[in-house]
Amino acid sequence: MKGIFSPKHKLRNPQSELFGGEIVESFEIPQRAEHVLQEFNKRNIGEVIEPIDFGVEPLLKIHDSKYLDFLESCHRDWELAGNTGDASALSWSSNKMDNSSTPNDINAKLGYYCLSADTFICKGTWEAAKESANVALTGANLIINEEYSAFSMCRPPGHHAPRDRFGGYCFINNAAVAAQYMIDNGSSKIAILDVDFHHCNGTQSIFYDRSDIMVCSLHGNPDEAFPYFSGFKNETGEGPGKGYNFNYPMPPNTDYFEWQKALLSALELINKFAPNKLIVSLGSDTFKNDPISFFKLESEDFFDYGSKISNLKIPTLFVMEGGYAIDDIGINMINVIEGFET
């Protein structure tokens, strides 16, 4: 299996975030990706290549153009307004109160496009997010050109980003961009399996009314876990997409015995859907020692579920999402990859 990695991820290096009522060091830091790369190389999984630049066109298939313009100009506008440090929202728009026009002031724009207070925008965010999408697209391109599997080591992650919002450390929805690229290049059906601890609210919303892209998500109960307001069982799609969206919310302290039941159910649905390609939004924050999650998977469990995914025998692109136990993120991520390959 080839890996795709770009050192440009380091351009996103936020200094802090809001957590537990305090400004703390960010959990989503460059070391995350570096640990994964080191473990991939240590185990000789395969060649690591740098991404191709696909430009902005594939991003516009998924994201609103004004939103992308905002991401590109945000930190520059923040500094021009006399601010220092990372850009953060001070006020959020309300669907009941805001007007239909996009605001001009940078503080208003931040609130308009932000969905969660945890995510600050630093100087290199746009370049890193754009490159992260290139990492995913390069992996998708490998699968289109008949590679059986690939691992896009994307940072920043993407699955919380809908068409026109950022949050949960996500700016461009890498998995969604890759899925649409596959559809545009000959695939008739794509399945996205999200095994990150947090619900893929962005991915779900993007494909909620479509029948050509199935989304299955295993995650913490949204009554108790970020992003809170989506990921319930009764969210099954709408219009043409009805019956193509599946959520598996689980309570605190869920162990692998229970978690794998949800996985096997999702794999059965994917098998029946019979997609041309599979995208796995791979988060390792289901690990028992993750600092911002509450599942109890052990490191060896990641190897086992990678093997279960491989039983589908579908060409598969792994797209890196979350995971914040820094000392273990590489081990757990690559356990999934090695399990799939074995």
Image: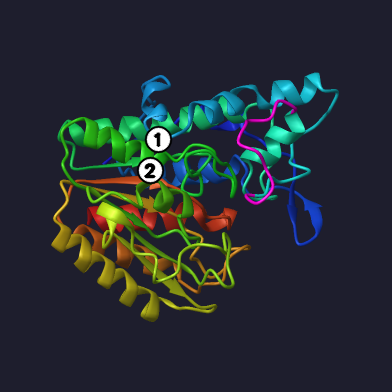
| Residue 337 highlighted magenta (yes or no) | no
Q: Which residue is mark 1?
A: 62
Mark 2: which amino acid?
Answer: Ala
Q: Give the x, y percent position of residue 110.
A: 69, 36
Please state which of residues 145 and 189 is positioned toward the viewer in this rendering.
189
Residue at disc 2, secondary structure: helix
Main SS class of the magenta portion in the image? loop
Q: Give the x, y percent position of residue 285.
A: 51, 60
Mark 1: which amino acid?
Answer: Ile
How many labels were placed on the picture? Answer: 2
> Residue drawn 59% across and 23% down?
72
Q: Give the x, y percent position of residue 1.
A: 26, 41
> Residue drawn 67% across and 27% down?
74
Q: Is residue 153 above or below residue 191?
A: above
Using the image, tell me which numbered label, if any, was put on residue 307: none
Q: Give the x, y percent position of residue 113.
A: 62, 39
Q: Which residue is mark 2?
A: 175
> Residue drawn 57% across and 59% down?
227
Query: Taking 281 as reference, is 64 left or right?
Result: right
Q: Earlier in the sequence, mark 2 or mark 1?
A: 1
Residue at disc 1, secondary structure: loop
**In which quadrant is the C terminus drawn?**
bottom left
Place residue 262 in its image quadrant. bottom left
Kindly indicate whether the residue at mark 1 contacts the one at mark 2 (C-beta within 8 angstroms).
Answer: no
Residues drawn in magenta: 95-105
Mark 2 or mark 1: which is in front?
A: 1
Q: Is residue 66 visible?
A: yes
